[in-house]
Image (spheres, grey):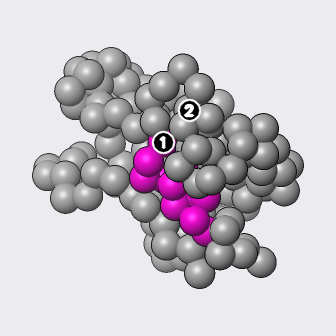
């Protein structure tokens, strides 16, 4: 169970992470604790699996990168092998199992449209799954995810 202080620290991590040579020192000062305590706290969260990693978010389109959301209809008996194949690609950033006809959903990014098509064709070939939805972004409505902690 997260304490009120945990929630405050985690919200700061999501919304106020500084671009500084010692970002945890800046966060710590804003929270009224020492840098050592702040680092120990985040290491504890990492060990406990609450915090998986800290990463920057980029606008891929501004970097010339193309991406798409893929939905696949994967038979239950092929799920494990299909997911493993998909996860072998460094171009895949998310991979989820969902209920419904299209039960495996993942995102793929590449340096060009041509490269993206090649990766998708390769995934289809290696998984043997042909029923694939390729859902390209038409318009971005939300660019920042901040998770409310209860």
Quadrant placement of the C terminus: bottom right
Q: Residues within 10 Å of mark 2 (few under 14, many from 20)?
A: some
- Horizontally, residue 34 falls left or right of residue 21, namely right
Task: Using the rendered image of the protein, determine whether residue 84 is visible from the camera's viewpoint.
Answer: no
Quarter of the image for residue 31 reads bottom right
- Residue 29, image x, y percentages: 58, 44
The residue lying toward the viewer, choosing from 81 and 62, is 62
In the depicted structure, whether residue 20 falls above or below residue 36? above
Q: Are marks 1 and 2 in contact (CB under 8 Å)?
A: yes
Q: Which residues are magenta?
A: 7-17
- Residue 86, image x, y percentages: 59, 39
The residue lying toward the viewer, choosing from 30 and 23, is 30
Quarter of the image for residue 48 reads bottom right
Q: Secondary structure at mark 1?
A: loop
The secondary structure that dominates the magenta segment is helix
In the depicted structure, whether residue 23 falls above or below residue 27? above
Quadrant placement of the N terminus: bottom right
Q: Which residue is mark 1?
A: 17
Q: Secondary structure at mark 2?
A: helix
Residue at 21% across, 48% down:
137
Residue at 46% across, 36% down:
18
* Total marks placed: 2
Residue at 54% across, 37% down:
26
Q: Residue furthest bottom?
A: 150
- Please check the rendered image and state whether residue 35 is part of the magenta-colored stretch, yes or no: no
- Residue 55, image x, y percentages: 53, 36
Quarter of the image for residue 87 reads top right
Which label is found at residue 23? 2
């Amino acid at each position: 169970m997260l304490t009120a202080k945990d929630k405050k620290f985690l919200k700061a991590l999501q919304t106020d992470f500084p671009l500084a040579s010692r970002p945890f020192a800046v966060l710590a000062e804003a929270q009224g604790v020492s840098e050592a305590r702040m680092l120990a706290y985040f290491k504890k969260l990492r060990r406990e699996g609450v915090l998986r990693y800290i990463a920057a978010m980029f606008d891929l389109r501004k970097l010339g990168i193309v991406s798409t959301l893929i939905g696949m209809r994967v038979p239950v008996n092929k799920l494990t092998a299909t997911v493993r194949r998909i996860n072998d690609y460094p171009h895949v950033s998310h991979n989820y199992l969902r209920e419904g006809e299209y039960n495996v959903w993942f995102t793929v990014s590449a340096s060009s449209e041509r490269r993206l098509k090649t990766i998708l064709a390769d995934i289809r070939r290696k998984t043997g799954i042909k029923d694939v939805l390729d859902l390209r972004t038409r318009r971005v409505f939300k660019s920042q995810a901040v998770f409310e902690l209860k």
